[in-house]
Every structure is written in C-alpha cells, then in structure tokens.
C-alpha cells in the first residue's frame, strides 16, 4: 500500500475542521476506469466497479485483501445499498438497474421507460421510503469501451425514480444534458444531481409524492472537467468528484476546499466503522483518506 502526501487545497478556513490524515492511501492499482464505490458496514468490505474491464472488485478492510467480486459484471457503473443492505447497481451492459438479493440472485428493477430501453444507468441512490433514484446518461452505449455500442432509444438523458410500491419507473427530471452522480441531503428533503456536460451540480426539493421542484444550480465549475459522483457528510457538506479532485462544498454552496489526486476522480463513498474514512475511485486506483468528519448517516439507520 502506497502513501501519498495529502494535497488539500483550502479556499475557506472552514475546511480546516474536516482535515484528518496527512497521507492518502492507494489501496489498489490496476483498474482501467474505477467507479461505483460502495461500503458494506456489516461485512467491513468495499466493492467497486472497473467498467471497461467488465468487473467488480472487493477490498477487505480487516485484511487488506483484494479480489474479484463479480466478473463479468455487466459493465456495472454506480452502486449503493438499500435499506436491507442489498447491493443496488447500475449496469451499462444490460442497460438496467439491479438488486442483488440476499441469496445472490440478481433482480432487474428497471430497464425501460415508456417501452423504450434505458440509455445506460450511471449512478443510484436509495431514499428511506424505499424509492430508488438513478441517472441515465448515454456513456455505456456511445461505444464499446464502457458497455456495448447501441442506439439511444429514449430521446434524452433523464433522472428516474423507481416507486417502492408499484415498482414503476417514473421520470423525475427531464431537463438534463448528462445527469450523473446524485445524493440526498441529511433529511432527504433535497436531492443533489450532477450534470457532467453542463459542469454544474443542481439541487431539487423533494415532495412527499416523490416529485421534484426547483433545480437551481448549487455549484458550478468553470474548468473543462464535469461533475461525477457525490456524497454528503454529516455536516451537510457536499463532496463531489470534479476532474482530478474531490471538491468540498458548504451547505450554502461555498467551495470550501478540494482534495487533489494524482488521477481523474469518478466517485467517492464514506466508510469504515465510524464512516470517517472516504474511499475514492480514480481511474487506475482506489484511494482512501481518514477525515475528521463522518459521512452522512442514512436517515433510516
Ligand atoms: Mg458517474
């Protein structure tokens, strides 16, 4: 395991409160495009995706051992856990959102909308009411690198919600260019969604019936890189992958600072027994750094 001095750029003095380790740990190297980190608290392991290699990997927190989790994976991209601790995944290959059941079988939760195949589900989050929210840009069908080249059937790249009662897939936002990472705030009254092509992060109000209102720009980036995955910490700060950095935004939208990495970053997740260790997927590598704050606790926990 390689140690790299932490490069934490501060833009606001409030960032000082989050700093922890002096070194970034490179836990693994050897992926083509690492994505979709998800931490399993009960098993103390982390699973992540290596999209072009059509596989998922698993890192054991207590031994440091790394090995295959699923291969082929169906070009899985984003992952999360549901309320029962089951893995929810976005598959580029079969253009679907799946749930891995306790017995290991895989259930399709969504693969179409209004009779047309989804583009290539990218990232996913579960709300405490059991609804599952995901984004559907076309990165998995534009070529054969991250999936299978195919025609886009749906006219647009939308954000969807799978209803926990009916299982129906409903569009909740239809004005995105390339929706990507998404996360709820601490009380789930707001949903943050990245638009990679527009280089900004938007925030919506969530109504009780599962529809969204608002959608103003919460944060924008004037560089050439777009936003990808994001998570919140227990102070309501938004941590988002942008270029070769993880940006940290105050709940008021101020960019507090950024953690610079040696490679392009795709996504992150908080884990460890105290959720104070952030795991970052960045191109060839899986990194982690322990911080002085905790990741947001799911509201049902
Ligand atoms: Mg993504």
Image: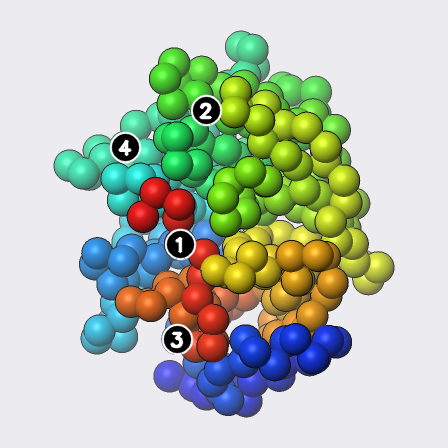
- Determine the residue positioned at 46% across, 24% down: 162
The Cα–Cα distance between marks 2 and 4, rounded to whole angstroms, is 17 Å
Quadrant holding the N terminus: bottom left
Q: Earlier in the sequence, mark 2 or mark 1?
A: 2
Q: Residues within 10 Å of mark 3 (few under 14, many from 20)?
A: some
Q: Residues within 10 Å of mark 1 (few under 14, many from 20)?
A: some
The Cα–Cα distance between marks 2 and 1, rounded to whole angstroms, is 22 Å
Q: Give the residue at mark 4.
A: 106
The x and y percentages for residue 112 are 50, 19
Looking at the image, residue 203 lies above or below residue 226: above
Dot 2 falls on a residue whose secondary structure is strand
The one of 227 and 257 positioned closer to us in this rendering: 257
Does the CB distance between marks 3 and 4 fall below 8 Å?
no
- Determine the residue positioned at 41% across, 70% down: 276
Q: Which mark is residue 162?
A: 2
Can residue 198 be seen from the camera position used here?
A: yes
The one of 34 and 296 positioned closer to us in this rendering: 296
Does the CB distance between marks 2 and 1 fall below 8 Å?
no
Q: Give the residue at mark 3.
A: 27
Say left or right for 44 vs 79. Answer: left
Can residue 281 be seen from the camera position used here?
A: no
């Amino acid at each position: 395991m390689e140690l790299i001095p932490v490069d934490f750029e501060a833009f606001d003095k409030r960032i000082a409160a989050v700093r922890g380790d002096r070194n970034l740990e490179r836990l693994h190297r050897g992926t083509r495009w690492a994505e979709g980190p998800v931490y399993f608290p009960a098993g103390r392991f982390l699973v992540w995706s290596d999209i072009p290699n059509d596989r998922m990997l698993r890192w054991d927190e207590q031994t440091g051992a790394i090995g295959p989790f699923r291969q082929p994976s169906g070009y899985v991209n984003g992952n999360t856990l549901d309320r029962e601790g089951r893995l929810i995944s976005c598959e580029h290959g079969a253009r679907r959102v799946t749930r891995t059941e306790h017995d290991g079988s895989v259930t399709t939760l969504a693969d179409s909308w209004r009779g047309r195949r989804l583009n290539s589900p990218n990232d996913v989050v579960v709300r405490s009411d059991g609804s599952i929210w995901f984004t559907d840009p076309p990165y998995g069908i534009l070529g054969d690198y991250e999936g299978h080249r195919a025609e886009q059937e749906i006219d647009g790249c939308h954000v969807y919600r799978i209803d926990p009662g009916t299982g129906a897939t409903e569009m909740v936002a239809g004005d995105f260019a390339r929706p990507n990472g998404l996360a709820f705030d601490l009380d789930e009254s707001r949903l943050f969604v990245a638009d990679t092509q527009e280089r900004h992060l938007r925030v919506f109000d969530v109504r009780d019936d599962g529809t969204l209102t608002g959608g103003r720009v919460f944060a924008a980036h004037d560089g050439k890189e777009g936003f990808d995955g994001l998570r919140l910490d227990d102070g309501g700060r938004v941590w988002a992958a942008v270029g070769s950095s993880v940006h940290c935004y105050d709940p008021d939208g101020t960019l507090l600072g950024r953690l610079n990495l040696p490679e392009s970053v795709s996504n992150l997740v908080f884990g460890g027994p105290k959720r104070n260790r952030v795991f970052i997927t960045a191109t060839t590598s899986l990194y982690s750094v322990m911080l002085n704050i905790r990741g947001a606790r799911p509201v049902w926990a």
